[in-house]
Image (cartoon, helix red, strand yellow):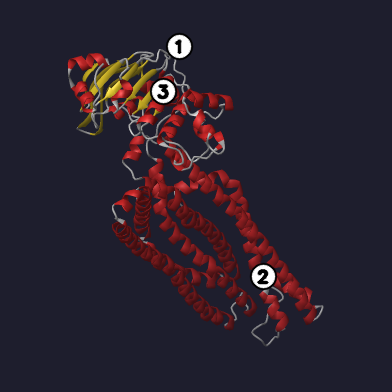
Amino acid sequence: MPSFTVRHLKPYAGRLAVYGVCVVLSVAFTMATALSVADFLKILFPPDTGSAMTVSTGGGSLLAQGLQALYDSLIVYGPMRALVAFSFIVFGLYAMKNIFSYLAAVLMASVRCRVVRDVRNELFDKAMHLPLTYYSSHRKGDMLARFGGDITEYEESTLNSVQQLATAVVSMVLYIAMLFYISTRLTLFVLVMLPLIVFVIAGITRRLRRNSLELQERNAFLTSLMEETIMGLKIIKSYTAIGFSNSRFQLSDRGYARLRTRVLRRVDLSSPVSDFLGNAIVIGILLFGSAMVMRGETGLTADLFVSYIMMFVLMIPPAKELTTAISHIKKGRACVDRMEEFMKENTETLDCLDNPECPESPENAIELKDLCFHYQEGQEVLKHIDLTIERGKTVALVGSSGSGKSTLADLLMRFHDRTGGDILIDGIPIQDIPLRELRRRVGIVSQETVLFNDTIRGNIAFGSPDATDAEIEQAARSAGAHDFIMQQPEGYNTNIGDGGSLLSGGQRQRLSIARTLLRNPDIVIFDEATSALDTESERLVQQSLETLLNGRTALVIAHRLSTIRNADNIVVLEQGRIVEQGTHDDLMRRGGRYCQLVQLQSITAE
């Protein structure tokens, strides 16, 4: 059993122990029913000294003596009454067997649901703590596949098979112990033939793990392809590329279907093969055991031999479940490997640790010293950046696309870690400030406004669950959002759809600003938040921005240079380097790169 599964089953050891007891009792009552067939036969065919059905009333095993005692206690009432009494006994045994089988199933279903819940929660928590660099190098569809297909496959192939395996092992141990007790010699004959089944099944399932891993990876690719297609459906339709998208998906789906067919073919082959071999062993038992009975060997009478055969037949289903469970566990090992690999990824540490160097009254000054960063070795995105952002000042970053503006903002939030140099806040290296504390102090209004399928109130209060209605309304008023909110059908309780799709771009951005205002951060990063807005929306957002930046240390990134003309310092980046910095008027007088950018946007200096 995979260590991953063992680790998640440990918290439920008590329930599993009770489950094991229920399985043992269920099998015990099943065996009792099979053994009572001996008495049934004796009632139907009374013992005769000249018959092969003769049962010795003395000697023999304790089992034979016990069955004889039961027969003697019933037959004194006559054959008919004995049959009626015996029927009630069998009915009671079956009832007890089914009761304990049901209890075992209920307990295991409870454990399985809890383990799946724990695994899903663990994966989700892991996903929340992974750095953004992980998502930039992995498909989102692969992540969705882990939460969907992988967990479903894990429950169906691994947890269900572990339950089958446990039940099969317990059942077979008890059955084999009883078979040994009835006839050691006949049972040894059976055990000699069992390795044949194991060898054949092992050959069938040998390649299952490798094929199943490839199957899970193809499933993840299909999920990613579907997610990507739905997200880009507008482009697909506008370029009349529906046929191309269908062909691409169908090609991948055909490969997935062929591989899945091969995997299921191997899994399904193990059951009929084990069934065939099990029946072959039954035939061998009939021949070998009948010869023993006819030779009158001690300890095995005709009625006990019938019970022996019944018990062996009862052992065939758990034997089949054992081989099937092993096949499915190998098949499910692929999704376990994928989840274990995911859980081993390095995560961010959000713990808010006490930092004795942290001043009681933060200055909110930011210093970048010889800052360097690259995503891939040898391809520097930021090169030797030296910059100071004083407390309460607004510094604007401008430059052409790809110059490193947004990357620098991401480094301040530690979405990525710098690869060279230092970032200091209030004189403390940023890596020494706990992430939870850092992100509490830094608010961000991003270029891509992220809102959730929730109410307006829920989106503004996101990250501030203890905020009161008055605080939420005040934040909305400060962001210039209150008026349009009150025009919505249910005001602050209006649901805004996926990503705020029921609102305009300017409305979404003002909600984002309100959310940041509610958190009241010391430092604000404003990342190109007006680049996609029309002039009227930009004006409204600009008014909200002035409220947000008032009295705060701010880093503003903008393509529309009209939004940063009043910044205390404008820093021009080109190819990851600072090429010039100063106020708007100073930079315009120099006639350098900033002046060129302004002229390109038809902005004239006053």
Sequence order check, earlier mark of 2 and 3: 2
Front residue of this view, candidates 134 and 339: 134
Nearest to the eye among marks 3 and 1: give it: 3
State yes or no: discs 3 and 1 in contact (Cβ < 8 Å): no
Residue 33: mark in rendering = 2
Front residue of this view, candidates 562 and 251: 562
The earlier-in-sequence mark between 3 and 1 is 1
Query: Comparing marks 2 and 3, which lies closer to the viewer?
Result: 3
- Residue 479 % position (x, y): 46, 25
Mark 3 falls on what kind of element?
helix
The quarter of the rendered structure image containing the C terminus is top left
> Looking at the image, which residue is at 37% across and 60% down?
208
Question: Residue placed farthest to the left in the image?
Answer: 591
Residue in the picture at 43% in, 24% down: 544
Does the CB distance between marks 2 and 1 fall below 8 Å?
Answer: no
**Kind of residue indicated by mark 1:** Ser
Q: Which mark is residue 543?
A: 3
* 230 relative to 291, above or below: above
Inspect this view and state whether residue 434 appears: no
